[in-house]
Amino acid sequence: MDVQEGTQQSQQLVLAHNVFLLKHPDVPDIEKVSLKDEVLNSVKSNDMTPYYETLVADKVVELDQSVLDSMRAKNVDEIKKLDEKIADAEENLGESEVREAHLAKSLYYIQIGEKEKALEQLKVTESKTVAVGQKMDLVFCTLQIGFFYMDFDLISKSIDKAKNLFEEGGDWERKNRLKVYEGLYCMSTRNFKKAANLFLDSISTFTTYELFPYDTFIFYTVLTSIISLDRVSLKQKVVDAPEILTVIGKIPYLSEFLNSLYDCQYKSFFLAFAGLTEQIKLDRYLHPHFRFYMREVRTVVYSQFLESYKSVTIEAMAKAFGVTVEFIDLELSRFIAAGKLHCKIDKVAGVLETNRPDAKNALYQATIKQGDFLLNRIQKLSRVIDL
């Protein structure tokens, strides 16, 4: 994980994704053979002794004692050299050289997967750092460690720390990068609405290639926007966005998924939806929320369809979606029971009747309720202070 951003995804995050796929039950065994080779090559080339031990303990790879001993010896030798450089810098060189020596040790600990020591060394490096921009780069290193280990507590604290640093100063380029990091954190913790807004803010200024390629960024932006934005906003910010239009065709099913929803082509939408499920299921950040996301997307599309009708036959809806009457009946009954859809099923007549809530009336009732609550508080307060 280099502090300088480039156009390459971080090797550690590529490794973490490959390990995730290696553990995933839906990945075919034949693919796991090549994945295991990639994981072992990456671990060996970076001398990742602590991470190798973790993989062995998790039974992801088999223990090879000679490989482990060789990597451990290289780690000891390299850390000794780095300590000598730090000692030399402290005795003979200036403050910036001392900082660079400590930073090199921090990056080495990150490279070999020694999480706790890397975090400690980053704190030491920060204590030697004066410039806000350089401090921000250290926070980005910490955030990458957090995403590598999926340590959301560390990520949350680091994002808060970065925001505090920006109050002292900081350039726009780093602020825009932080938005992508925070957006990925929000998406990984199921806050899709905030993630969508942060991703959309970063579309034209994206430089965070160490996290993922631009295609993947657009994939996440479209997926989070579909379940977060209203129809008008979706058209303005996503469907017609030139940055998205240049890339969306490269991602299988994504263009059909977005445009068929906006164009109300529900049969095409379901076909594209089925094609995308595999990509979502095999994504390291989206996988834990797979079932939730599937439900939310169906809620959006069913609500959009029913918005146009006071009542509609179940058969007509099933035909529009290219599914059976039984499937739609079962689906809608679940969503209605969960309070996700505002309609009722007349099973005898085979009709769906919408009963959309009156927004004005709901606001009136809420105002009355809040007013009563305020009067009660004032009465209690008046008794206490004996007006």
Image (cartoon, rainbow, N blue to C red):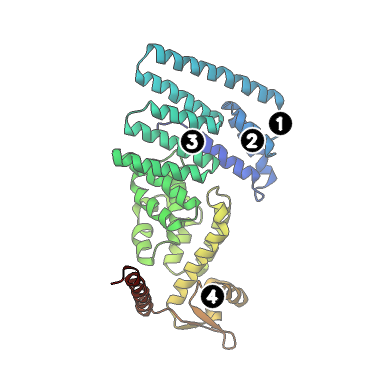
Instruction: Write down the quadrant of residue 222 in the picture.
Output: bottom left
The disc label shown at residue 63, or none: 1
Residue type at mark 4: give it. Answer: Ile
Q: Of the residues under marks 2 and 3, which one precedes in the sequence?
A: 3
Picture coordinates of residue 324 (x, y %)?
Answer: 60, 75
Closest to the camera, between mark 2 and mark 3, is 2
Q: Is residue 278 above or below residue 9?
A: below
Spatial distance from mark 4 to mark 1, Cα to Cα?
52 Å
Helix, strand or loop at mark 4: helix
- Looking at this view, name the residue that lies furthest to the bottom: 349
Residue behind mark 3: 10
Residue behind mark 2: 54
Q: In the visual, does 217 lie left or right of 328? A: left
Q: Residue at x 62, y 19 (%)?
A: 73
Picture coordinates of residue 19 (x, y %)?
Answer: 61, 40
Helix, strand or loop at mark 1: loop
Q: Is residue 99 above or below residue 237?
A: above
Mark 4: give few (<14), some (14-19) or many (20+) Cα within 10 Å.
Answer: some
Relative depth, front residue between 266 and 23? 23
Q: Of the residues under marks 2 and 1, which one precedes in the sequence?
A: 2
Picture coordinates of residue 384 (x, y %)?
Answer: 35, 69
Q: Residue at x 61, y 35 (%)?
A: 39
Residue 324 can be seen, yes or no: no
Closest to the camera, between mark 2 and mark 1, is 2
Residue type at mark 1: give it. Answer: Leu
Q: Quadrant of the C terminus?
A: bottom left
Residue behind mark 4: 336
Residue type at mark 2: give it. Answer: Thr
Q: Residue at x 54, y 75 (%)?
A: 336
Q: Of the residues under marks 3 and 4, which one precedes in the sequence?
A: 3
